[in-house]
């Protein structure tokens, strides 16, 4: 679309709006259930529909969840707040307005440190977090002129996290959304499920010449449903805007949608210079006072968050930062690792087991560590067997752990014995296998003696195969070298 040399002249500027549905049992202003996947229009009531004579009441759990998020991102909790009505018409907005926070968001400011997949750190500055109700869902069926409306989602509590226009790399934008998803899951305030739409992201994208301090004309890309698509959409939109500028054409400020199939954005509707939402304080809801004592009480119940755990794992357990970040990808993984470190002092081996064999097992089963059948103590016992050279790592990771997961009730060492996995490092066991392996490849043995030392791996593989995992690799390597060099 545009040469890289042209792209390099410009700076990308992105501000994000992340909408997270909160996992409360009832809606923000009514007792209707929030269950996902119900038949259309069953989770609604007179209050959700704002029928005459009904009055909303704020769900206390929504406030608590939003305060937790505000504390997690280092924001300032507003002591005095009120809800506003945001007036606009849309078929899936049953009231004709959305109850939200405009003038007094529950959280002001804040920041979040993120790290991209390439390991680049960045501080994302937040503008605000506010609470509001979600709208319903419109469905447009192919070939039908009608629009179907499902109001189950109307009134489901939303927390909107708004950044400043401070992001200059699509990878940082994706990392930020990933970190938000991780934090809401750690806090237990949301499931962060982008596929079901309970976590959605809008991106305000503009470009400007490097060195300029004036923001360019922005376009808003709506409702992206994965970190990869956030990055793809922003990258495409940046190049599209640069091409328009280079061609001397104006950038029209508009709302755009992203097509995941072809990786392009398309205009939906132009944005007015000033949206006339006619905000005014909601007359049906009294102002709220959030006392500092309540904030402190909520803070005392919060779990350790990913950033704290990364610091702990690197300092206390002496892990590389790469390991620590992978281990804290989920709360269940971090908790399992901490329990494992309580049962073994070989922290690096614990990390390797978590990121290697155990991660493969959980990925294949589509589960997290909180439902893994093997306990941290059993994994610690396996690590000890490997450290004591009683069982090889290969046998432990390929055979022992899989048998353990089948529900074996005895000790790990007894299971290893029953599977005939206990290593035999004695010369009487190893020397006959080494002689057989050398006899099997006489020409390779001769080549080794003439200097082709890389053939050692061939003989090692053959001996280990014949030993069926019972040979100590270090001892085998030593005896094999001696035999070949006679």
Image (cartoon, rainbow, N blue to C red):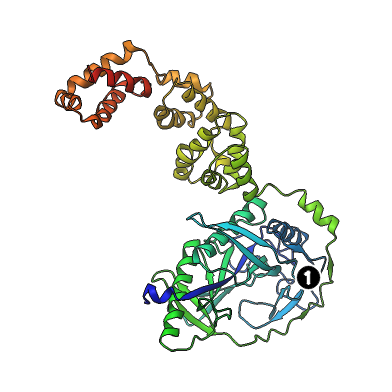
Residue 363 is situated, as x and y percent measured from the top left of the image, at 46, 45
Residue 48 is situated, as x and y percent measured from the top left of the image, at 71, 71
> Going 25% across and 32% down the picture, which residue do you hit?
454
Q: Secondary structure at mark 1?
A: loop
Looking at this view, is 113 or 370 the one in front? Answer: 113
Q: Residue furthest top?
A: 428
> Going 20% across and 27% down the picture, which residue do you hit?
448
Taking 208 as reference, is 124 above or below it?
A: above
Looking at this view, is 80 or 6 the one in front? Answer: 6
Q: Quarter of the image for the N terminus: give it.
A: bottom left
From this viewpoint, is residue 415 visible? Answer: yes
For residue 288, which quarter of the picture?
A: bottom right
Taking 68 as reference, is 162 above or below it?
A: below
For residue 2, which quarter of the picture?
A: bottom left
Residue 96 is situated, as x and y percent measured from the top left of the image, at 68, 81
Looking at this view, is 1 or 144 the one in front? Answer: 1
Taking 145 as reference, is 330 above or below it?
A: above
> Going 46% across and 25% down the picture, which residue do you hit?
386
Q: Is residue 256 left or right of residue 190?
A: left
Taking 61 as reference, is 6 above or below it?
A: below
Q: Which residue is mark 1?
A: 56
From this viewpoint, is residue 141 visible? Answer: no
> Going 65% across and 47% down the picture, which residue do you hit?
308
């Amino acid at each position: 679309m545009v040469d890289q040399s042209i792209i390099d002249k410009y700076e990308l500027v992105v501000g994000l709006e992340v909408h997270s549905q909160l996992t409360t049992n009832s809606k923000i202003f009514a007792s209707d259930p929030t269950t996902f996947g119900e038949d259309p229009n069953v989770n609604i009531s007179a209050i959700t529909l704002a029928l005459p004579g009904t009055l909303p009441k704020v769900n206390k759990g929504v406030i608590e969840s939003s305060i937790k998020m505000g504390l997690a991102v280092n924001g300032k909790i507003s002591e005095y707040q009120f809800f506003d009505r945001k007036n606009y018409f849309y078929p899936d907005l049953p009231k004709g307005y959305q109850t939200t926070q405009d003038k007094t968001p529950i959280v002001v400011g804040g920041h979040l440190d993120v790290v991209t997949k390439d390991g680049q750190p960045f501080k994302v500055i937040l503008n605000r977090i506010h609470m509001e109700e979600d709208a319903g869902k419109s469905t447009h069926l192919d070939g039908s002129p009608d629009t179907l409306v499902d109001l189950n989602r109307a009134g489901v509590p939303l927390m909107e996290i708004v950044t400043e226009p401070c992001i200059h790399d699509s990878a940082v934008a994706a990392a930020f959304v990933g970190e938000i998803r991780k934090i809401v899951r750690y806090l237990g305030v949301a499931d962060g499920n982008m596929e079901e739409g309970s976590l959605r992201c809008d991106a305000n994208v503009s470009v400007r010449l490097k060195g300029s301090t004036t923001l360019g004309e922005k376009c808003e890309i709506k409702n992206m449903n994965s970190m990869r698509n956030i990055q793809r959409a922003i990258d495409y939109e940046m190049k599209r805007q640069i091409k328009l500028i280079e061609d001397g054409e104006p950038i029209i400020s508009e709302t755009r949608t992203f097509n995941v199939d072809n990786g392009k954005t398309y205009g939906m509707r132009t944005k007015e210079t000033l949206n006339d939402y006619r905000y005014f304080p909601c007359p049906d809801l009294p102002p709220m006072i959030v006392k500092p004592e309540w904030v402190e009480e909520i803070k005392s119940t919060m779990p350790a968050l990913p950033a704290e755990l990364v610091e702990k794992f690197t300092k206390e357990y002496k892990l590389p930062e790469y390991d620590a970040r992978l281990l804290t990808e989920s709360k269940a993984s971090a908790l399992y690792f901490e329990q494992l470190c309580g049962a073994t002092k070989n922290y690096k081996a614990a990390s390797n087991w978590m990121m290697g064999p155990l991660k493969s097992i959980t990925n294949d089963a589509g589960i997290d560590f909180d439902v893994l059948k093997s306990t941290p103590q059993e994994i610690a016992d396996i690590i000890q067997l490997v450290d004591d050279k009683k069982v090889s790592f290969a046998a432990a990771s390929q055979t022992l752990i899989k048998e353990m997961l089948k529900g074996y009730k005895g000790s790990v060492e007894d299971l290893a014995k029953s599977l005939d996995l206990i290593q035999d490092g004695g010369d009487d066991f190893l020397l006959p296998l080494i002689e057989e392996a050398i006899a099997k490849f006489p020409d390779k043995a001769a080549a080794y003696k003439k200097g082709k030392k890389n053939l050692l791996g061939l003989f090692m593989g053959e001996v280990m195969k014949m030993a069926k995992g019972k040979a100590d690799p270090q001892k085998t390597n030593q005896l094999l070298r001696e035999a070949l060099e006679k």
